Image (cartoon, rainbow, N blue to C red):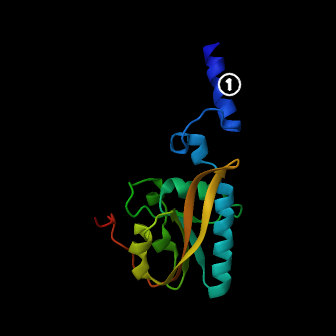
């Protein structure tokens, strides 16, 4: 009976938030809103490619975000995980941006929304001709905001890349 009750509670939480869990502690909430995020990245990617006539790739700063973008991308296009200051993960076993991109290519980057310039954007700025802030997307579960992600448009890759591991300065 206890197992059935707990299972029922978990299923109910998956359908609608019945437990008052903070967003950061609710694994279901962390996965919400990525269909809208993926759509925004797709629009940015298509718009930037049309404006610059260059191949435009997409990436996220963390592997969790890259995986959710890849899952929700209807075109199943390549999504990179940059992990400049993160731990090593599965994405490092696959070809990355520097392996597949050519000079002049663009990158649509998804990072956490921060007040100051995100350290990944700062680290990549010297390697692109133009870096612009794109759309801010609020991730929602139902009508409740569970997080924000900022899209950055990096145009005209010059070649090169920050050393790994990149650490933001104190």
Choose top left, top right, bottom left or bottom right for residue 92: bottom left
Q: Nearer the viewer, residue 63 or 15?
A: 15
Up the image or down, 125 lies above or below 10; here it is below
Count of number-bearing discs = 1
**Helix, strand or loop under label 1:** helix
Task: Report x, y in % for residue 5.
Answer: 65, 19
Local crowd size for mark 1, using a 10 Å CA cut-off: few (<14), some (14–19), many (≥20): few
- The image quadrant of residue 18 is top right
Please state if 42 lies on the left or on the right of 156 as rendered: right
Residue in the picture at 43% in, 79% down: 125
Let me know if residue 146 appears in the view. yes
User: As drawn, which residue projects farthest toward the left?
Assistant: 170
What residue sits 44% from the left and 72% below the top? 121
Q: Which residue is mark 1?
A: 8
Q: Position of residue 32 (x, y in %)?
A: 64, 49
Q: Visible in this render: residue 76?
A: no
Q: Looking at the image, is 1 positioned above or below residue 137?
A: above
Residue 71 in the image: above or below residue 102 = above
Specify the quadrant that holds the C terminus: bottom left
Q: Residue at x 36, y 73 (%)?
A: 162
């Amino acid at each position: 009976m206890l197992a059935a009750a707990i299972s029922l509670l978990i299923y109910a939480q998956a359908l609608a938030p019945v437990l008052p869990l903070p967003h950061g502690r609710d694994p279901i909430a962390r996965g919400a809103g990525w269909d809208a995020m993926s759509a925004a990245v797709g629009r940015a990617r298509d718009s930037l490619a049309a404006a610059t006539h260059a191949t435009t790739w997409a990436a996220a700063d963390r592997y969790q975000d890259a995986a959710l973008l890849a899952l929700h991308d209807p075109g199943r296009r390549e999504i990179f995980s940059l992990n400049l200051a993160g731990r090593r993960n599965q994405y490092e076993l696959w070809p990355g941006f520097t392996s597949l991109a050519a000079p002049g290519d663009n990158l649509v980057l998804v990072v956490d929304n921060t007040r100051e310039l995100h350290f990944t954007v700062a680290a990549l700025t010297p390697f692109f001709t133009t870096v612009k802030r794109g759309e801010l997307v609020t991730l929602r579960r139902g009508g409740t905001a569970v997080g924000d992600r900022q899209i950055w448009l990096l145009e005209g890759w010059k070649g090169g890349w920050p050393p790994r591991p990149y650490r933001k300065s104190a």
